[in-house]
Amino acid sequence: MNYLEFHFEVHPVQPASEILIAELGELGFESFLETKTGVQAYIPEEDFSGLDKENLTILQHPDIQITWTSRVIAQQNWNATWEKNFHPIKVDKLCLVRAPFHQAEPVDFDIIIEPKMSFGTGHHETTYMMLKLLLEEQLRDQSVLDMGCGTGVLAILAEKKGADEIMGVDIDPWSYENAKENVARNHCKHIQILNGDADNLGETTFNMILANINRNILLKDIPKYHSHLKRPGALLLSGFYLKDLDAVSAKCRQYDLKLEKKLQKNDWVAAKYVH
C-alpha cells in the first residue's frame, strides 16, 4: 500500500496548524508531524479523495493561508522517511520514547517505538499529555484498555508501570500490525492487541481506560467506555481541544464520570474522569 505525503505551509502556523490537523484527521489522514512552517501529513493513497474548501473548511478562513505539495511514498520507503524526522521524546525526566536507532538514556521507563504510519510517538501534544497522566498513576496489578492504540506506546507504558492485563484496540489494520511489533520490541508479556473498535470488547472490564481519539468518536463511545469501566475506575481522554472540554465533560457526567484533572498543551487537552 502506498501513502501520500503532504507538506502544508501554514500562515499563521498556530493555531491554524492544530485546526488543520483536526480537519485532516476527519478526512482519513493517519499521521502528522508539526514543522516550523506547518504540517506534514500522511494518508493511504487509496483513501484520498482530494482537498478543497468543501471538505477542508479551514481553507475558507480569510486570515489563514495554506499551500501544499504532495508526493507518493511506497510502503517500503516509509522507514527512511520517519527516521529522518523522528527524535526522542522525554516526559518528566521519567519516560523516554525513542526509535531503535536512538541511544538509551537512564530513565525509569525506556520505550522503543518504530511508528511507521501509526499515530503515537509522543511528539503530538495529546500523546505527550496522555503519557504524562499515565506516569502519575499507580498501575500495578491493574487492567488497562488503550482505545485507538496507534503505535501501542500508552499500552507499553502501562505494562512498564505494572499493569498486568492490558488490551490495545485500533480500527486501522496498519496500526494493529505496528502496535503488535512495538509490543514485541519492548518485550511486553501482558498486552493483547485487537483490530477493531469499541464494539469488539465483549464483556471485559478494566480499572482504567485510555482513549486518545478525536472529539466525535469520544462523544459517541463514552457510553461504551463507561460500560467497560470498573467501579471505582478512571477514564483518561485526549484528542480534543480546550473548547471541546465542556462537551466531553458533560457527556461523561451523564454516566457519573467526574472530571478530576486536566492538562493543557497549546490548545489541546487531556483529562482524567473518575467514578
Image: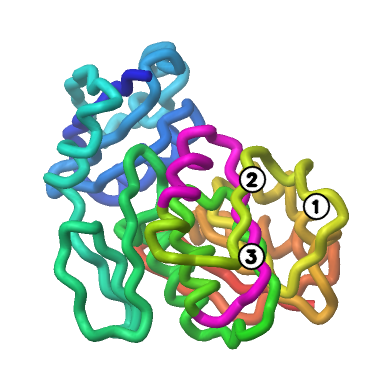
Q: Circle 2 is placed at which residue position? A: 194
Task: State which region is magenta.
Answer: 161-181
Q: Find residue 223 and report its horizontal and vertical position in percent.
A: 81, 54
Could you tell me which quadrant the C terminus lies in? bottom right
User: Decide: marks 3, 2 in contact (CB < 8 A)?
Assistant: no
Q: Is residue 76 left or right of residue 261?
A: left
Q: Which residue is mark 1?
A: 224
Residue identified by numbered label 3: 166
Q: Amino acid at mark 3?
A: Ile
Q: Position of residue 162 (x, y in %)?
A: 56, 81
Label 1 and label 3: CA atoms lie apart by 17 Å
Q: Amino acid at mark 1?
A: Lys
141 vs 21, nearest the viewer: 141
- Residue at 44% over, 61% down: 153
Q: Quadrant of residue 97?
A: bottom left
Q: What is the distance, in whole Å, between disc 2 and disc 1 at their CAs?
A: 16 Å
Question: Is 62 situated above or below 84?
Answer: above
